[in-house]
Amino acid sequence: MTKICCIGAGYVGGPTMAVIAHKCPSIEVAVVDISVARITAWNSDQLPIYEPGLDEVVKQCRGKNLFFSTDVEKHVSEADIIFVSVNTPTKTRGLGAGKAADLTYWESAARMIADVSKSDKIVVEKSTVPVKTAEAIERILTHNSKGINYQILSNPEFLAEGTAIQDLFRPDRVLIGGRETTEGQKAIQALKAVYAHWVPEERIICTNLWSAELSKLAANALLAQRISSVNAMSVLCEATGADVSQVSHAVGKDTRIGPKFLNASVGFGGSCFQKDILNLVYICECNGLTEVANYWKQVIKVNDYQKNRFVNRVVSSMFNTVSGKKIAILGFAFKKDTGDTRETPAIDVCNGLLGDKARLSIYDPQVTEDQIQRDLSMKKFDWDHPIHLQPMSPTSVKQVSIVWDAYEAAKDAHGLCFLTEWDEFKTLDYQRIFNNMQKPAFVFDGRNVVNVEKLREIGFIVYSIGKPLDPWLKDMPAMA
Ligand code: NAD
Ligand code: UDX
């Protein structure tokens, strides 16, 4: 029986390994992590991450050929194939701080593999890493290899949160990069055989190591660039009376462009886009490619502009001050169908409003009170370090209350801000909400989730990203 071990039981390691175990009953899969809390949760009825369809897959395989454990060394030493899916956050200090990937967790995983291995291993980079990382990992592993043969493969993950299980069941492609030597090609075939249990052969792409590593950064950069492009258009739409949804629809009909990933928003979030673009920028700068670095930097600048613009719009619409006013925040996760808040635009928007002394009442169907309080009191980039996974008592932000109902959040509020596109927001009783709010009652839709016309009929003053401005707002002093 082939044995697989995955180091890192997070948003990628957990679902990816659960699907491998589900699709390959002949393979034994162990997912290991240094976080006791995370492993305990993976072994319980309350999984550590919310992902549609994940519970069923885990329940079918757990205890049969899927195991979650903190006994990292035992499982690593027994495995034939080791996936490394640890976090690779942005460095917070030292050389490259604020841009470069922090490979501390990766390096310590590699050193541990070298220490405990007694047989040949295929080591798979599942984490997103800077191009050329495999070379560094190879050196760490082979420095004191005791005659053990290591083959390093790059197998970046393309799943998106909220749709992880369907993405893993039917991936657009699986990418495997390896050395162009006989041993390297043999290792590629071994990993390909795992995916071939359910992925059609034509969807498994094999490349050299550097192409695979760089393709991951390139894919995320291109996806984020599309959002910043459409968000830049949303600003022009508001200035001219065009409607960004109509523009996206018309543009997306061009088969060369395609309809996906053209939704204007308050800004992209999530643990990957910003981190991976910063990483790409840093690699370009290290290679002396200033123009290329500046091109990609602009994608992040537009994203920051979009978040700031939203805050300015809220404040300027509400007579240039939100001091002491209650504002309901509907949705805190970085997108729907996940409880993940890493780099969610909600953090920047909430902090912006808190800076203007607003009182916030926050509702999200999947994010806990602790998580929100922690996010609002944490320094930028600190979230992606494992210490963050351990229980701790966050200092709560006084002007913030977290509630478990959209109606409760909206009660007596001056304004509603939609920051995540949860489906349930489409079917709320807006007349009831309007009746219980302060007047004038404002709606600021950062996700194009509400029916603007209907809400205006009820009496709301509505701002929706990239849509023609409410006549009421047009007359307000321009701040955005
Ligand atoms: P995560 O923070 O959810 O999980 C990483 C886990 O690794 C944590 O549980 C942490 O405790 C553990 N860990 C860290 N060092 C360890 C060590 N030395 N030994 C054992 N465990 C260790 O992160 P994630 O979202 O799963 O992302 C992991 C990697 O995958 C990152 O490089 C990320 O860029 C990439 N990625 C993420 C996504 C996504 O949607 N989240 C998608 C594609 C790729
Ligand atoms: C992304 C990539 O899509 C995935 O392939 C990679 O493996 C990890 O990073 P993820 O961050 O989980 O996945 O979600 P994604 O659906 O890409 O959304 C990222 C952010 O962009 C979210 O905040 C989302 O709301 C926003 N977004 C997405 C838009 O604002 N508009 C869109 O049209 C699409």
Image (spheres, helix red, strand yellow):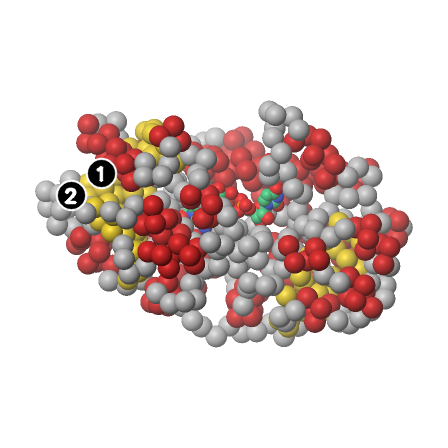
Is residue 461 among the parts visible in the rendering? no
Q: Residue at x 60, y 24 (%)?
A: 256
Q: On the image, numbered disc 2 is attached to which residue?
A: 120
**SS of the residue under disc 2:** loop
Say which amino acid is labelled 2: Asp
Image: 335 above or below 143: below
Residue sitting at x 61%, y 25% = 255
Of the image marks 2 and 1, the number of the one nearer the N terminus = 2
Image-quadrant location for residue 39: bottom left
Left or right, 20 with respect to 348, comes to left
Judged left or right of residue 147, residue 289 is right
Mark 1 surroundings within 10 Å by alpha-carbon count, few (fewer than 14), some (14 through 19), many (20 or more): many
Q: Position of residue 322 (x, y in %)?
A: 76, 65
**Residue 14 in the image, given as x and y percentages of width and height:** 38, 54
Q: Is residue 179 visible in the rendered structure shown here?
A: yes
Relative image position of residue 92 (x, y in whole percent): 45, 54
Mark 1 CB in 8 Å range of ligand 1? no
Tell me whether the residue at label 2 lies in contact with that at label 1, contact meaning CB atoms closer than 8 angstroms: yes
Residue that numbered label 1 is attached to: 151
Q: Nearer the viewer, residue 72 or 59?
A: 59
Q: Residues within 10 Å of mark 2 (few under 14, many from 20)?
A: some
**Residue located at (40% from left, 31% from top):** 203
x and y percentages locating residue 40 in the rendered image: 35, 67
* The quadrant where residue 329 appears: bottom right
Q: Residue at x 53, y 35 (%)?
A: 222
Viewer-proximal residue, 400 or 308? 400
Q: CA distance from mark 2 to mark 1?
A: 8 Å
